[in-house]
């Protein structure tokens, strides 16, 4: 058994992953550096290279951790919503949390801009290709389940159209310096869902 596989080692590795995920959300890829991660985790600098062979491995673990956290939070909210009746507004907010991140709830540009910068910047990092595809597939499965359980008769092609509409609304809002890109996406998505399942 290596030190990294002991309970203490696993705890330290987890602290580093959580710290890296926080930095990634707050400042993008450039913010994830060995020293910054170690300081955020409250661990020695050498621990980052002891538990991870490279910064790329650490970033990959951080991306997976954050995606898993968001998916689990989404599943729990879906379970709670499924136990009672709920309206279109609740579905919209849950979907936007999954697409834009919970940090976007209070409005503002920074968290949404950082999220889209990470998404757009991922193709420049080949080591993220597989985990990003895997996480995207699981995200789409969850969003599909949300729509199905809410009683909305949407096929997967329509679901992808709605996701593209959200992305378009967000990007346009960012270009136009809209102070609330989530608000723009909310209006677009809610209007489409209330209009029905037929494409515009």
Image (tube, rainbow, N blue to C red):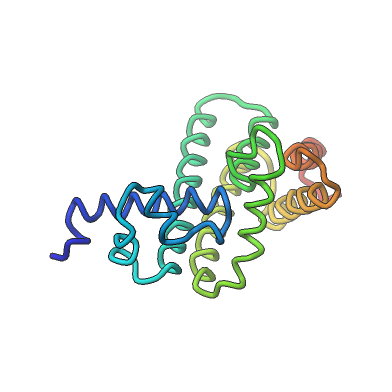
Q: Where is residue 19 in the image (x, y as percent from the top left)?
A: 42, 50
Which residue lies at the image location 41% right of the left edge and 63% below the top edge? 58
**Residue furthest left in the image:** 1
Q: Position of residue 56 (x, y in %)?
A: 45, 69
Residue 61 picture quarter: bottom left
Quick check: 191 above or below 57? above
**Residue furthest bottom in the image:** 126
Please tell me how many numbered marks the rendered image carries: 0
Q: Where is residue 5 in the image (x, y as percent from the top left)?
A: 20, 60
- 103 left or right, relative to 46: right
Quick check: 192 above or below 119? above
Residue 95 picture quarter: top right
Which residue lies at the image location 30% right of the left edge and 55% below the top edge? 44
Q: Position of residue 43 (x, y in %)?
A: 31, 51
Q: Tell me the quadrant of the picture where the N terminus can be found.
A: bottom left
Observer-nearest of 16 and 98: 16
Which residue lies at the image location 26% right of the left edge and 49% below the top edge? 11
Observer-nearest of 52 and 75: 52
Which residue lies at the image location 16% right of the left edge and 65% below the top edge? 2
Observer-nearest of 129 and 190: 129
Quick check: 69 above or below 44? above
- 119 left or right, relative to 72: right
Observer-nearest of 69 and 62: 62
- 53 left or right, relative to 95: left
């Amino acid at each position: 058994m290596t030190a990294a596989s002991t309970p203490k080692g696993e705890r330290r590795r987890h602290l580093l992953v959580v710290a890296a995920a926080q930095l990634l959300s707050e400042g993008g890829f450039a913010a994830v550096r060995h020293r910054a991660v170690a300081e955020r985790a409250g661990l020695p600098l050498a621990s980052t290279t002891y538990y991870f062979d490279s910064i790329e491995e650490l970033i990959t673990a951080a991306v997976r951790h954050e995606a898993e956290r968001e998916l689990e939070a989404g599943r729990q909210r879906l379970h709670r919503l499924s136990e009672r009746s709920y309206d279109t507004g609740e579905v919209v907010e849950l979907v936007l949390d999954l697409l834009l991140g919970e940090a976007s709830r209070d409005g503002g540009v920074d968290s949404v801009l950082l999220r889209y910068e990470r998404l757009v910047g991922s193709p420049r990092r080949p080591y993220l290709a597989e985990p990003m595809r895997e996480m995207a597939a699981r995200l789409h499965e969850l969003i599909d389940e949300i729509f199905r359980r809410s009683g909305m008769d949407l096929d997967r092609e329509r679901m992808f159209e709605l996701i593209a509409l959200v992305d378009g609304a967000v990007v346009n809002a960012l270009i136009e310096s809209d102070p609330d890109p989530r608000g723009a996406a909310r209006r677009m998505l809610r209007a489409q869902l209330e209009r029905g399942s037929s494409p515009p």
